Image (cartoon, rainbow, N blue to C red):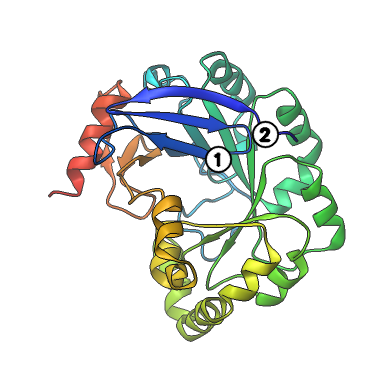
């Protein structure tokens, strides 16, 4: 896939350019970036899931609730906002495709995160959504053994990113994924939801896995062309030690809540991130106002 400019927009005191491969550039002539609205939103739309991962921080269950995708907050999203839809299993939501079409008409960039088991199950549908530009990126949660057949499917989807939880994923799984030109996102282990009890029962195992990945970061950089981290993984793995200061300053995308926010549209709550304190949206229908509310959480 050739790299093409997807969109350009102004946010507060700076401009943003975003490309179809997910890369992004912020620029201005100021000393800092001050956004008016979130560039990207981690948005939970389903708490329904039949897998039952013991470390699921969202505590998703087979009879879980679904979000109201007609909530007016979605109609306030500026063009080129990135909306990362997750759960739970997003495919359990019967209104998903209509919602994606509505967002596409507004030039909102929708991405989805799915468990590898659901990726296999809904592979054909995912291809349809990608080919019709209804989703631009696919995150696949992989924290178990993968087969070569899985990797073949991964390679067929543009902008697919493999998501692995440090402390859960086996290093042997990362070895299997290596050298296939796959993008890797390492997530920190979340002591939230079911992750609390799982973390308590397997503390030493989790810590050993985290330390092992941290100690082999140089090796991972040889295996994957792009490795990204959420802020929790940055604190647990300290990847900064493996790169120079200039590269860090160029690639670090900001603290939680600085350019991003979390929405649990199942419970209609908002937060700095999925593991931060959540507060009700109440009657708020404008994303600018809600973003300002979320950023105030960090000051309280």
- Spot occupied by residue 156 in the image (x, y as percentages of width and height): 81, 43
| Residue at the disc numbered 2 | 3
Task: Determine whether the residue tagged by mark 2 lies in a helix, strand or loop.
Answer: loop
Task: Give the residue number, with chain letter if any, for mark 1.
Answer: 23
Give the residue at x 75% y 55%: 181
Q: Give the x, y percent position of residue 185.
A: 57, 56
Contact, mark 1 vs mark 2 (Cβ under 8 Å): yes
Q: Secondary structure at mark 1?
A: loop
What residue appears at the point 71 percent right and 30 percent down from the top-left corner? 130
Q: Residues within 10 Å of mark 2 (few under 14, many from 20)?
A: few
Image quarter (top left, top right, bottom left or bottom right) of the N terminus:
top right
Label 1 – label 2 distance at C-alpha: 9 Å
Q: Residue at x 43, y 67 (%)?
A: 240
Q: Is residue 261 left or right of residue 131?
A: left
Of mark 1 and mark 2, the one earlier in the sequence is 2
**Residue 197 drawn at (x, y percent):** 43, 72
> In front here: 146 or 252?
252
Whether residue 57 appears in this view of the structure is yes
């Amino acid at each position: 896939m050739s790299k093409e400019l997807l969109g350009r927009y102004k946010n507060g005191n700076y401009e943003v350019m975003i490309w179809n491969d997910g890369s992004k550039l912020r620029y201005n002539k100021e000393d800092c970036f001050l956004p008016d609205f979130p560039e990207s939103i981690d948005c939970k739309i389903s708490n329904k899931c039949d897998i039952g991962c013991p470390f699921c921080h969202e505590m998703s269950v087979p009879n879980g609730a679904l979000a109201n995708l007609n909530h007016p907050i979605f109609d306030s999203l500026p063009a080129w906002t990135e909306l990362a839809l997750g759960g739970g299993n997003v495919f359990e939501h019967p209104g998903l495709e209509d919602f994606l079409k509505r967002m596409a008409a507004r030039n909102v960039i929708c991405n989805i995160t799915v468990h590898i088991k659901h990726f296999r199950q809904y592979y054909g549908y995912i291809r349809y959504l990608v080919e019709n530009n209804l989703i631009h990126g696919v995150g696949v949660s992989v924290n178990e053994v993968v087969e070569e057949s899985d990797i073949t499917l991964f390679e067929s989807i543009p902008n697919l990113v493999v998501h692995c939880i440090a402390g859960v994923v086996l290093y042997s799984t990362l070895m299997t994924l290596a050298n296939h030109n796959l993008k890797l996102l390492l997530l920190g282990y979340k002591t939230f939801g079911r992750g609390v009890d799982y973390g308590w029962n397997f503390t030493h195992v989790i810590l050993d896995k985290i330390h092992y990945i941290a100690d082999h970061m140089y090796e991972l950089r040889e295996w994957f062309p792009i490795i990204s981290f959420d802020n929790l993984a940055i604190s647990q793995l300290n990847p900064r030690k493996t790169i120079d200061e200039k590269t860090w300053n160029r690639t670090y995308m900001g603290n939680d809540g600085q350019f991003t926010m979390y929405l649990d549209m199942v419970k209609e709550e908002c937060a700095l991130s999925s593991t931060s304190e959540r507060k009700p949206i109440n009657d708020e229908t404008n994303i600018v106002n809600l973003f300002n509310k979320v950023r105030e959480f960090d000051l309280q």
